[in-house]
Image (cartoon, rainbow, N blue to C red):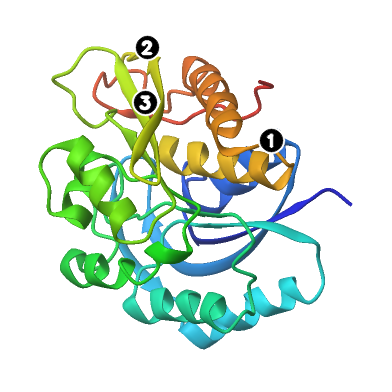
Amino acid sequence: MRPVVLCFSGLDPSGGAGLQADIEAIGQSGAHAAIACTAVTIQSSQQVFGFEACAAALVKAQATAVLDDLPVKAIKSGMLGTTDNITMLTQLFAEQIISTDTPFVLDPVLVANSGGSLGDEKTLVSAFRQLLPYATLITPNTHELRALSGEQDLHSGAKKLCAQGAHAVLVKTSHDFDSGDIEQYLYIEGEMVHKSTLPRLEGEFHGSGCSLASFIAGRLAMGDDLIDAVKSADSWITQTLRAADDPHPEDAQAQLIPNRFIHS
């Protein structure tokens, strides 16, 4: 069968982000998505109202059922929600339940694009650091990068996360709204190896970060090297945002939902 990406992510009822974004993006990458659900959120495409995290034992049981059954070629984590879930995923790597040779894309979700809380940020930041040594790639937005690294300068922050154990960091400036085009910088082992410039499209998008990280994970599962996977994802995500659905066309401030059924 197609290579499998095992995703640890939460349910977004609107279908804009979370596990549905993972499934659609990974499917478009050519791989197959399997999901260990980490939380059930209460949210629309515009706002997070609350969430209930799944117990770590339940998430682990979901993951091990997939690992025992399917040809998992990559791992992706998004919303983990609790320190228990982060610790559980760390233990899966440490105990070799997940091979440390398996590419792992870590999207360190702290808050939703709409600004709603998805867990206590301070404790999540501390817990995420234990996952860094297992990460093939970490894909923080600028807020997450600064929170995780303690650095305001994005390049210094990326280098620091590499020094703390992450193999590579993809710096995304999409959340710096005072800048022009979106610039992305890929650091591998502390050195910038690739820079891309993407057009800053009008509006805000619900689930773009989930989609980008998942597509990269899918391409890694398919055998791409990291730079090629990022380049392919850049091209694909731009198309999905250009074709995004607008659930509230009467509201210029409403978030759009990426149309992920676009071929790269």
Q: Are marks 1 and 3 in contact (CB under 8 Å)?
A: no
* Secondary element at tag 1: helix
Q: Are marks 1 and 2 in contact (CB under 8 Å)?
A: no
Foreground of the two, 212 or 58: 212
Comes first in the chain, label 1 or label 3 = 1
- Rendered location of residue 250, percent (x, y): 31, 18
Which residue is under mark 3?
248
Which residue is under mark 2?
199
Q: Looking at the picture, which amino acid does disc 2 mark?
A: Pro
Q: How many other residues sit within 10 Å of disc 2, few (<14), some (14-19) or many (≥20)? A: few
- Rendered location of residue 44, percent (x, y): 38, 46
Give the distance between the C-alpha atoms of the residues marked 3 and 2, in whole angstroms: 23 Å
Give the distance between the C-alpha atoms of the residues marked 1 and 3, in whole angstroms: 29 Å
Q: State whether residue 201 is above or below residue 50.
A: above
Q: How many other residues sit within 10 Å of disc 1, few (<14), some (14-19) or many (≥20)? A: many
- Rendered location of residue 144, percent (x, y): 24, 49
- Which residue is at 33% across, 45% downward? 140
Comes first in the chain, label 1 or label 2 = 1
- Rendered location of residue 167, percent (x, y): 44, 52
In the rendered image, which quarter contains the C terminus? top right
* Secondary element at tag 2: loop
